[in-house]
Image: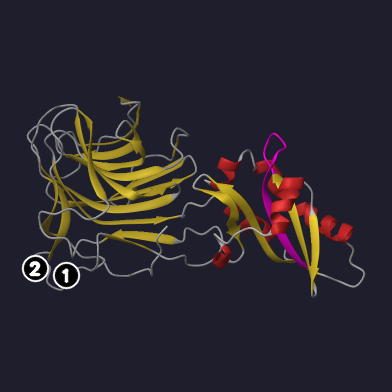
Amino acid sequence: MARAAVSLLRFFPAGAAALGALLCGAGLWAAELRVGLLDVPVGGLPAGFRPALTGQGAPGDWQVISAEIPTLLPPLNPEARPPQGPAIAQLSRDATDERFPLLVYEPEVFTDFTLRVKLKLVAGDFEQMAGIAFRLQDPENYYVVRASAKGNTFRFYRVHRGQRGPVIGPEMDIAAGVWHDLEIECEGNRIRIRFDGREALPELTDPTFREGRIALWTKSDSVSYFADLRITYRPRTTLAEDLVAGALARYDRLLGLRISAATADRQDLHVVASHDEKEIGAPGTEAEQRAIAENQPLVAKAGGEMIVCLPLRDRNGDPIAAVRIVMKSFPGQTEQNAVGRATPVIRMMQPRVLSLEALTQ
């Protein structure tokens, strides 16, 4: 995953999107994506976005345009027009009824996140809709929340295998030709949605999609604009990374901790998770290889430290990875005692490990 410094600019001046760096503390949503459009020519598309279509009809005509976009601060002159800025627009007027143009952000799959975006319902003879598809698996499977100026409705529903699920949401006045603020928060199977600063729906619970991509969404002949798309999210981690982080948080006696395994794209034993990110990808040691091959712990002493390598087993009891634990030694420390001190770490990890794929992907 690419990581870069967090910017506080309204739009990133370089490229189509930028990813925020880790901020601090385990368990925080620690990355931010803001779609940057200033360097995208009018008529172009920001990098990382791909048009798609649910249903029938012509593909969407997605492109960057120049539009009046209100700033966060109120203007000094109330009569002044909002400044011009870049926005992403869907301009096709194909009126096919079951036609849902999407613009998918491809580089990132999101699990837990908070998304904020401005949207504007501009035109449409049959429909004037705009929304966000999220936890998108493909154009046939996702959640969507959308606003309609023609019907004055605000709706959430699930698209599963191309079929629309139960529609949830109220009737409300939704003006065309003005910018609206939409916020979506997903955490686990809980979904919260705000529209123009207020709770538009009660908290929703749906377990169908645990993660997925984000897409801009419209319907039929709707001409819609989107601007200032921001996503704060928890970067995806592997189970191996979660296990290392959890053990380090629980056992302060650990001086070092890492998991080594083979993976689908690299068959040799190598470090897949570690307290030290610089170790990621390094070859596994002979002791780690033996711990897996012999399915038993190995202990070594180096200076004032005890190093214990233990096998990590899948649900069938087969060793699939090695956990290397470094602890401070003490006078009279024995190998048996060192294994005893390291065993609770493995016991904490083991119940969550079902397979090598689940551990490393």
Q: Kindly identify which residue carries mark 1.
A: 75
Q: Is residue 210 on the magenta stretch?
A: no
Q: Position of residue 157 (x, y in %)?
A: 34, 32
Marker disc for residue 80: 2
The Cα atoms of the two marked residues, 2 and 1, are separated by 7 Å
Is disc 1 surrounded by few (<14), some (14 to 19) or many (20+) residues within 10 Å? few
N-terminal label among 2 and 1: 1
Q: Position of residue 59 (x, y in %)?
A: 15, 36
Q: Determine the secondary structure under disc 1.
A: loop
Residue 60 placement, left or right of 36: left
Quadrant of the image containing the N terminus: bottom left
Residue flagged by tag 1: what amino acid is it?
Answer: Pro
Q: Position of residue 35 (x, y in %)?
A: 27, 58
Which range is magenta? 313-327
- Point 32% across, 54% down: residue: 116
Residue flagged by tag 2: what amino acid is it?
Answer: Ala
